[in-house]
């Protein structure tokens, strides 16, 4: 992905100092850019009642980034117990968390039900017997393929 000019203007003046301080390699995230892009997305859907964007935690399971996303009003799409824990550690609760996992075990469903639960997003109807306690809100993914 090409670097935005606004990010270059913020980064290049301090890049040598960052390298000198931290060494290389390192990951650097643009909080201003993340906030701006997230707000643009939120604004695009703001006229839709009850719409909520869920950030896929597996993409970037970094508590600082998750906190930014929470500040922007995003929920969290989790696919593992570790992602549930991270989301809850930064303050996400129940409807802030969607649990979308594959081949989910009963243990994972128990973890999803803890601390006020979350929205379950199931791959298929065969997972229903594994759910120890059915949450108020549940959804199913539809795969039109084989």
Image: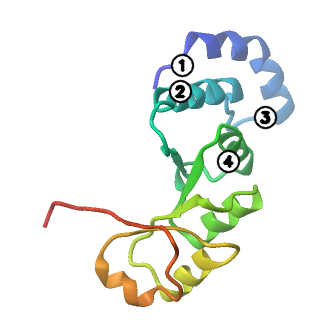
Q: Residues within 10 Å of mark 4 (few under 14, many from 20)?
A: many
Give the secondary structure at mark 2.
Answer: helix
| Residue 91, disc | none
Q: At which x and y percent is residue 99? A: 51, 66
Give the secondary structure at mark 3.
Answer: loop
- Disc 1 to disc 2, C-alpha distance: 23 Å
Q: Which residue is mark 2?
A: 43
Q: Is residue 104 above or below residue 52?
A: below
Judging depth in this view, the residue of 22 and 107 nearest the camera is 107
Q: Residues within 10 Å of mark 1 (few under 14, many from 20)?
A: few
Q: At which x and y percent is residue 84? A: 63, 66
Q: Which residue is mark 4?
A: 66
Q: Is residue 30 above or below residue 110?
A: above
Residue ranking furthest to the front: 49
Residue sitting at 52 percent across and 45 percent down?
Answer: 52
Q: Which residue is mark 1?
A: 3
Give the secondary structure at mark 4.
Answer: helix
């Amino acid at each position: 992905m090409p670097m935005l000019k606004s990010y270059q203007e913020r980064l290049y003046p301090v890049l040598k100092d960052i390298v000198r301080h931290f060494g290389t390699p390192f990951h650097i995230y643009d909080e201003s850019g993340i906030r701006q892009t997230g707000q643009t997305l939120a604004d695009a859907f703001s006229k839709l009642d009850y719409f909520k964007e869920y950030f896929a935690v597996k993409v970037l399971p970094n508590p600082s980034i998750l906190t930014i996303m929470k500040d922007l009003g995003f929920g969290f799409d989790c696919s593992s117990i570790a992602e549930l824990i991270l989301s809850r550690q930064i303050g996400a609760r129940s409807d802030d968390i969607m649990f979308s996992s594959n081949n989910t075990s009963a243990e994972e469903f128990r973890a999803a039900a803890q601390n006020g639960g979350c929205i379950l997003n199931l791959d298929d109807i065969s997972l229903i017997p594994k759910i120890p306690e059915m949450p108020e809100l549940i959804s199913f993914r539809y795969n039109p393929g084989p």
